[in-house]
Amino acid sequence: MDIRVKFLGGAKSVTGSKYLLEIDEYKLLIDCGLFQGLKELRKRNWDNFPIDPAEVDAIILTHAHLDHSGYLPKLFKEGYDGPVFCTTASGELLEILLKDSAKLQEEEANYAKKKGYSKHKDPKPLYDTKDALKVLPKVKGYDFKQEVTINDFITFRFQNAGHILGAAIVEVFIQGKTQKKKIVFSGDLGRFNDPILYAPEIIEEADILFVESTYGNRNNPMVNPKQKLADAINVACERNGCVLIPAFAIGRTQTLLMYIKDLYASGEIPEIPVFMDSPMAITATSIYSHHTKFHKIEDDALENNESFIKLSKQLNIVQSHEGSVALNYIQKNAIIISASGMMTGGRVLHHLYNRLPRKNDSLLLVGYQAEGTRGRRIVDGEEEIKIFGQMVKVNCHIEFIDGLSAHADQEELLQWLKGFKKHPKLTFVIHGEERSAQTLATILQQEFNWNTKVPDYMESVILFKGI
């Protein structure tokens, strides 16, 4: 039996994760992510898949974020019809994420056509809602630690990765004619002291390891993020402005709500209204109550309503598009939380369009901003940002809170890697911008004496021959 891997994404980038394991003739895809960020990366979404999608036999997802799952509707649209294995919580999140992704792409294509800012005469979405719905009947959910048999020679199991609800480390076991091999995919590893999620499970052995490296070149300590949040809100109130927080609908939004609840209770911030303007986040919050074993939140802190966390009368759930637009008329003393976290799409765009020029308002960035995203350009100090085909001046105050990212930083990645009792035969350092991946790979080589490789996009590597 021969085993090889082809890197179809998530190589020298933090997006588009797709790793094709070819086990003799059997083709197993680990993750099926959408490329986001840089235009040169996003264009890959439109390329033909390297093989006929109908030839892929099965897909395993580490978690539901779109950079790991968002390409699924396109793959089904083009002929894939096999199973999609994930955790039970990821399966529920996947339904809302894929539907929302399809809807946003349809709306953006229609808006581009209406406003005429696309170079295409009749711009089309990458996929539509009908394509997203094809995926859902094929999703198969499992618990952590449950052994799953794919066929006579492949089994796998999920281990907790932290990061977001249901995120998993994937252990793949392959039985050859004479040997059994274990291949581990870290997925996206979470924080070891996350206020909501449990620390990533320690894995003690692997023949081949694929490890993420989002923060492979730097630390991102969780040094009192709650106090930094309080400071940013208080300063905005003193300026008679509003605070706009772009936040991922799954994970970051729930952590923010919990911190704001605590700050209200302690009197560290005034009880100004909070507007949760993300339909996906509103739906996602209820899923936490279905999966209590996946997180630390006490039962009495959960409510059977959309708010998820008891946040008093100040939490306002914004359901409609009209309600979202109406928020633009609020001039002061309000917190608006809206997706997406890196400002690549969604309702947050019209908030940015209206609030970036306002000198009294604050834009509060609370997570990693990938290359090529609006968030990264704002962090890098660009004075104008293109939104809806127009350049918008950045006059508002820009605040950044370290420590709220859902990714393990360099210290935590090394802490997790030290859990291996013996080093893998080969470790691929993936899901990180090139400098970040190379830094982590070098540390593993020089300090751990590990054999590491930072793969290129579309590179193919033989893992085992004749096992």
Image (cartoon, rainbow, N blue to C red):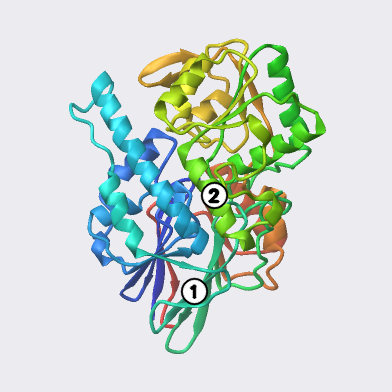
Q: CA distance from mark 1 to mark 2?
A: 29 Å
* Residue 427: percent from left, percent from top: 56, 63
SS for dot 1 = strand
150 lies left or right of 383: left
Let me know if residue 33 appears in the view: no
SS for dot 2 = helix
Let me know if residue 291 appears in the view: yes
Query: What residue is rendered at 45% in x and 60% in y?
Result: 61
First reached walking from the N terminus: tag 1 or tag 2 = 1
In this rendering, the answer to whether 114 lies above or below 90 is above
Amino acid residing under circle 2: Ser
Query: What residue is rendered at 41% in x and 24% in y?
Result: 322
* Residue 161: percent from left, percent from top: 60, 59
Q: Quadrant of the N terminus?
A: bottom left
Which quarter of the picture shows residue 451?
Answer: bottom right
In this view, the residue in front, 453 or 274, is 274
User: Residue 248 bears which disc, if any?
Assistant: none
298 lies left or right of 343: right
* Residue 70: percent from left, percent from top: 39, 49
Q: Which residue is mark 1?
A: 156
Q: Residues within 10 Å of mark 1 (few under 14, many from 20)?
A: many
* Residue 278: percent from left, percent from top: 49, 35
In this view, the residue in front, 201 or 253, is 253
Q: Which residue is mark 2?
A: 286
Query: What residue is rendered at 67% in x and 47% in y?
Result: 409
Amino acid residing under circle 1: Phe
